[in-house]
Image: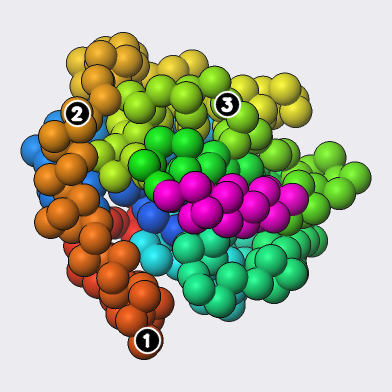
Amino acid sequence: MAANRSGRRPPPATRFVALGDSITVGLGDGVTMGREHRRTATHGRGFAARLAERLGPPGAVDYTNLATTGATARDVRTRQLPVALTRDPQVATVVAGMNDVLKRTFDPLQVRQDLVWTVSRLRAGGAVVLTATLPDPGRLLPLPAPLARVLAYRVGRLNAAVRATARADPGVLVVDLGRHPAVRHRSSFDVDRVHPGPHGHRLIAQAFALRLAQAGLPLVGAPSGPGAAGDLDAEVTAPGTLRHSYWLLSVGLPWLAGRCLPGGDRNAYHTENRLVSHPRRA
């Protein structure tokens, strides 16, 4: 790297890689499943891009988002991790497992093995890894009691797997989004009441940034000025019942039906990927 005019070499960029599913893609932050909203300077990015802004000033962060919609923990391990390791990240986020929870063939042991392997390989490369427990979507969805109990049990097993990735390793930072106060408010979620909305993505980025600061990693201040993420997101209100019902009939139920038919998990994976597009690099 060439020296600048003052004779000093510019500081090396912080290498940040984000792995995961549609939450890390940014679904809900300007783009909802099946419905694209008008993008503004503050929307359509997701928590990972917001966190990247806190890791260093403009131009000082090498940010790669490898997440894909519909990805399972196995997909993160087999498809995203090998690419992530070539980036030699210093900071990585791994948020995955909800698609496993929704599969008919949910295997908590396999999910645990995949998540532990992914995190341990990133740690072996020297990266500080951020991961998170996830909230039970049954708290906001009007589900029959038997289904709600199954979902709560599965989310509990997923979160136990997430905590297992940390073990006694101080380089694995777990953020407890599952019990974050914001999960009790609909304003934190998109119209599907599963993915974070713009306000929810901002809260996740803040929670991750706080966890990094507690671990002693220096962060830059929150973005400021026109178009920066900030108080505008706090004004986002929860999608109303009518809008949620319309989304459920036009998008949600057909998607869920795709998961229940033979080969549905695979069909739903491709359907969700067609519903939203995202940049791989930022």
Residue closest to the eye, 12 or 40: 40
The residue shown at (17%, 48%) is 247
Determine whether, in the image, residue 186 is placed left or right of residue 67. left
Per the model, the C-alpha gap separating discs 1 and 2 is 33 Å
Q: Quadrant of residue 225?
A: top left
Relative to 188, say whether 81 is above or below: below
* Residue 263 badge: 1
Q: Residue furthest front?
A: 145
Q: Which residue is mark 2?
A: 240
> Residue shown at 37%/86% (left/top)?
263
- The answer to whether 4 appears left or right of 263 in the picture is right
Identify residue type, mark 1.
Gly
The secondary element bearing badge 2 is classed as loop
Residue type at numbered disc 3: His
The kind of residue tagged 2 is Gly
Residue 196's spot in the image, x, y percent? 38, 38
Identify the disc placed on residue 180.
3
Image coords of residue 161 (percent x, y): 73, 56
Q: Specify start and end residues of the magenta stretch as a single range.
A: 144-160
Numbered disc 1: secondary structure: loop
Lower position in the chain sequence, tag 1 or tag 3: 3
Dots 1 and 2: beta carbons under 8 Å?
no
Q: Nearer the viewer, residue 57 or 219?
A: 219
Q: How is the image coloured?
A: rainbow
Q: Is residue 207 left or right of residue 171?
A: left
> Which element carries disc 3, helix, strand or loop?
loop
Q: Residues within 10 Å of mark 3 (few under 14, many from 20)?
A: some
